[in-house]
Image (cartoon, rainbow, N blue to C red):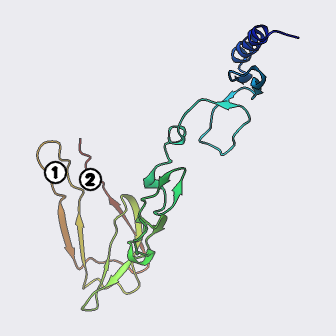
């Protein structure tokens, strides 16, 4: 029968070999009879790109360190994911019909694209907003009246690098002659960026 000291020496050698090969971990207690070697495969790392957990052993970490998107601001309120309780708001009530066309907004976690193209105001007139930056075309509506219209434009403002930013230029034209159904080219410039 093997002596206790000899058995302990052999177990330590197995433990060292397992650690050096990266193939296992040895757990033991003062009682030699409870020495156990767990084969766990190669050391692994969690991947934020998928939810696969490969067999093996892992270095101590937090899930937030693996994937920084695991943040309370990205989780719905009242939902707890791995100890992170969400704070993302969900009380907005806008609809696509409340947002100007070509503009987008997030409501309760969903991206909405606006559908407002005209608003009828008191006095029977219509006001049309063209706000998307860049070049575009606008189709003159069928009810366009060349003798009773106003076109107003406001340019992009200046940056506020020193002091306050400058306001955008304003221009107004009245009774512009256009043919209903034709396309008119326009360009909306972006404001200057601050630094």
Whether 119 is drawn above or below 113: the answer is below
Q: Helix, strand or loop at disc 2?
A: loop
Residue 165 shows which numbered tag?
Answer: 1
Q: Which part of the image, by quadrant, shows the C terminus?
A: top left
Q: Could you tell me residue 105's position as x and y percent?
A: 41, 65
User: 56 or 98: nearer the eye?
Assistant: 56
Q: Residue furthest left?
A: 163
Label 2 belongs to which residue?
191
Q: Which residue is found at the position 69% from the left and 40% from the top?
A: 53
User: Of residues 50 and 111, which is closer to you in this image?
Assistant: 50
Which mark is first along the chain, 2 or 1?
1
Measure the C-alpha gap from mark 1 to mark 2.
10 Å
| Quarter location, residue 125 | bottom left
Q: Secondary structure at mark 1?
A: loop
Pointer 2: residues within 10 angstroms few (<14), some, or many (20+)?
Answer: some
The one nearer the camera, 158 or 72, is 72
The mark closer to the camera, 1 or 2, is 1
- The label on residue 133 is none
Query: Which x, y percent locates residue 162?
Result: 13, 42
Residue plotted at (23% across, 80% down): 175
Residue 99 image point, x, y percent: 39, 72
The answer to whether residue 37 is above or below residue 179 is: above
Q: Is residue 47 left or right of residue 143?
A: right
In this view, the residue farthest toward the bottom is 123
Q: Give the vertical position of 155 relative to 144 (above or below).
A: above
For image coordinates 24% across by 66% down, the residue present is: 153
Quarter of the picture containing the N terminus is top right
Measured from the top left, where is residue 161 in percent x and y? 17, 42
Say if mark 1 contacts mark 2, CB within 8 Å.
yes
């Amino acid at each position: 029968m093997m002596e206790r000291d000899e058995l302990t020496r052999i177990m330590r050698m197995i433990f060292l070999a397992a650690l050096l090969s990266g193939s296992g971990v040895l757990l033991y207690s003062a009682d030699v009879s409870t020495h156990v070697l767990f084969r766990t495969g190669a050391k692994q790392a969690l991947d934020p790109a998928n939810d696969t957990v490969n067999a093996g052993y892992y270095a101590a970490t937090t899930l937030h360190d693996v994937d920084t998107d695991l943040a309370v601001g990205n989780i719905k309120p009242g939902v707890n994911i791995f100890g992170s309780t969400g704070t993302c708001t969900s009380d907005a009530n806008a609809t696509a019909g409340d947002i100007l066309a070509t503009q987008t907004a997030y409501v309760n976690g969903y991206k909405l694209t606006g559908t407002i193209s005209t608003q009828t105001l008191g006095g029977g007139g219509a006001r049309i907003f063209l706000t998307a930056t860049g070049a575009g075309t606008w189709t003159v509506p069928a009810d366009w009246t060349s003798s009773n219209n106003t076109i107003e434009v406001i340019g992009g403002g200046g940056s506020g690098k020193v002091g306050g930013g400058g306001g955008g230029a304003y221009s107004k034209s009245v009774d512009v002659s256009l043919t209903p159904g034709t396309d008119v080219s326009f360009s909306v410039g972006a404001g200057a960026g601050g630094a």
